[in-house]
Amino acid sequence: MATVKFEAQEIELTEGESVLECLERSGHPIPNSCRSGVCHSCLMRATAGELPPAAQKGLKDSHRAQGYFLSCCCYPDTDLSAVRVDADSMRIGARVLRKESLNERVLRVVLEANEPLDYFPGQFVNFARADGLVRSFSLASVPALDDGLEFHVALVPGGKMSGWLHHEAVPGDDLELMGPLGNCFYVPGNPEQPLFLLGTGTGLAPLYAIARDALHQGHTGAIHLFHGALVAADRYLVEALSALAQDHANFGYHPCVRDEAGADWVQGEVDAHALELVPNLKGWKVYLCGNPTLVRNVQRKAFLAGASMQDIYADAFLPAGG
Ligand SMILES: Cc1cc2nc3c(=O)[nH]c(=O)nc-3n(C[C@H](O)[C@H](O)[C@H](O)COP(=O)(O)OP(=O)(O)OC[C@H]3O[C@@H](n4cnc5c(N)ncnc54)[C@H](O)[C@@H]3O)c2cc1C
């Protein structure tokens, strides 16, 4: 079995164990969240040994060249020496600027970063609390339109980060941010291409950012945003999105509520409604965010409806732990 050399210890990997699991077993807590290679919070650096390609999937070329790897996806065949990444160089400090309730379960959190964060609206960042807790949140703000970094945080029952943000964090509290990450954002250069945006819950955060960014950059093609909720009270930003639809003839806002009938929304499953309205996605760019099961299902359906794989962008909000 291969070994992992870490902080003066040499630890043998057990069958099927990732480097992250091996280090945790040996009493070395490594920041982590999704444990699926998405959030990048378990990033480490190899100083010797050979990295399996899967451990570097999705990393920037410059990071790959320096030996950075995702410890949750690293199953080495040969001995590896690894170090923690220099946290300071990968993180920027930020503080809570304001909090505002968007509905009973969703909080708008606006942060101010200590230095400008170079991001595309819709990407996500990792929030790292001083005690090491790390969770990913999508950017709902557009740098050209908003001051501060905006996030929409759903309260998860018993949730450590969402509970803290909802109930305890106050303006002035410090956090560290890692990122930005992800490729769910508007890419200019094809202003007539129609855009299909679909999400549930706080999956709206990146979609809201992408739609506003596209409109701000003069997108002329149709933009349809479908937001799914279980009950009417789970919808949010209804007024802002309705106003956006009034101001822009090419923007359509389609709220769907599964379990309640009402005059202001369509009752039913959001994906069924969306694909009824847009049955042929050939030539469309598709953005899917939020519940992982829904994202996976609609990814498949969008492909079957004609969207090309390279035009489907998805951010599944995987819970911590994979
Ligand atoms: C790329 C990415 C982007 C994300 N963007 C956002 C965003 O913009 N807004 C947002 O609100 N969240 C987002 N998330 C989810 C977020 O990172 C956290 O997982 C979420 O806030 C819960 O963390 P927590 O610490 O409060 O709960 P935890 O303490 O991690 O979990 C508490 C319990 O709840 C369960 N649980 C966790 N999440 C859920 C859930 N969604 N539904 C049901 N049970 C759950 C856990 O399994 C655990 O049993 C994103 C995730 C990813 C990977």
Image: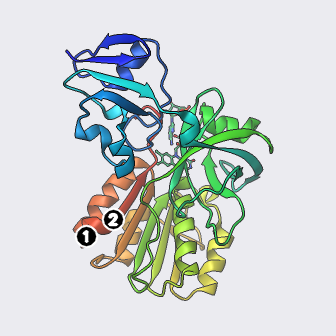
Q: Measuring from the top left, give residue 212's x and y in whole percent.
A: 58, 73
Where 268 falls versus 37 (above or below)?
below
User: Which residue appears at 62% of the width and 63% of the height?
Assistant: 141
Element under disc 2 = strand
Picture quadrant of residue 309: bottom left
- Amino acid beneath label 1: Ser
* Residue, disc 1: 308
The residue at the point 37 percent across, 66 percent down is: 272
User: Looking at the picture, how far across and down is residue 49, in whole percent?
Assistant: 26, 27
Is 140 displayed left or right of 200 in the figure? right
The percent position of residue 66, horizontal first and vertical second, equals: 37, 41
Which amino acid type is marked by label 2?
A: Ile
Residue 33 is left or right of residue 2, and the answer is right
What residue is shown at x 23% (from left), y 22% (from top)?
A: 16
Residue ID for mark 2: 312
Q: How far apart are labels 2 and 1 at the CA level?
A: 7 Å
Q: Quadrant of the C terminus?
A: top left
Answer yes or no: is residue 256 visible: no
